[in-house]
Amino acid sequence: MRANRVATCLLGWTLAACAATSAFAADIRFKTAPATGYAKDISVSDPALQACDWNAKLVSNLVKETKGAVATNADATSTAKTLHLYVTKFIAPVTSEKRDNLIVMRADVKDGDKLVATMDVKQEKSLRAGKPYCEILQEMGGDIAEELAEWLNDGKFADCGAGCAGIHPDDPIFLNPQIQIVDKDAINDTVVECGWLKYMPGKVIKAVNESEHSLRAKLQLAEGDIAKVSGRKLTLKVSNIHVLGGGGFTGPKWISMQGDLTDGSLLAASFEIKYLIKSSKFSACGVLEAGSEGLSEEIALWLKGPRLNSKL
């Protein structure tokens, strides 16, 4: 592909155009097929579906939305990770008075043949008959491409070298039964008295397992030392908590945390967050609990498509 670009430059492209093209090639991070696939249990025999190129249009939109970070296989470099896109759920009736359309697209990122990241994107639209079938699918595909682009553009994904087995998204994730402390100055006596270190893991589990963005496997408490868990685990640590009683009269309040998602020996994803608490509660414990609810939702959203070095 590089030779083709050089030949094109020699045939008369401007220097600026050649430079831009070379930069575009250097920025490719993911290679994918020209159109998304379908899970084996999804029928694609309907002529109206076969005539519609919505899944190829989705890939084209994704290439544009990522500014070339995603490229089709023919344009990709050998060092790019593989992005495998395929539909796992598909409800799109061709004819009915009211169309309830559902598409769930799975995005798998692989380093070689090892899975290092995955995310499901769900799109639903209820539309009355009259709008062209293919146009509906292309609109939904465009929305899916936007969400995928945000995930890919903002994220760094693990490298999986020799001895790496990749990730196992269908296995449960174990969470430390008590939040770890980065250093002794991270929290004060009030936080300990409120019981936050012990109740926070339960709030995260509830937010994750009851979220509309539910994972393929559940999050659950580890029994004992999280370091002894050999499978998938999420280790949460607190680096700073600033809470005071007195409601809005005592200034800003926040919780700063970090988390590592590991799968065996592979650090698959990580995050840091400074969550600003917005609460009218008057007691310090009330403020802390209110902030913990919102913080748990942020962690649950991150787990939908976890990435390395995420700043939430």
Image (spheres, grey):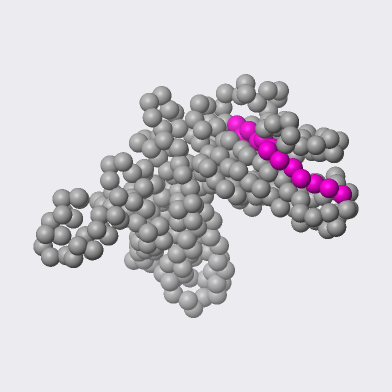
Q: Position of residue 173 (x, y in %)?
A: 61, 34
Let me know if residue 184 appears in the view.
yes
Magenta segment:
233-245
Question: Residue at point 63% right, 39% down?
Answer: 258
Q: Nearer the viewer, residue 259 or 182?
A: 182
On the image, which quarter does residue 177 sit in? top right
Q: Position of residue 83 (x, y in %)?
A: 39, 47
Query: Position of 16 compared to 227: left or right?
Result: left
Query: Is residue 234 in the magenta section?
Result: yes
Q: Main secondary structure of the magenta part?
A: strand
Question: Residue at point 55% right, 72% down?
Answer: 127
Question: Residue at point 49% right, 56% down?
Answer: 150
Q: Nearer the viewer, residue 205 or 296?
A: 296
Q: Nearer the viewer, residue 132 or 258?
A: 258
Query: Is residue 235 in the magenta section?
Result: yes
Q: Nearer the viewer, residue 295 or 185?
A: 185
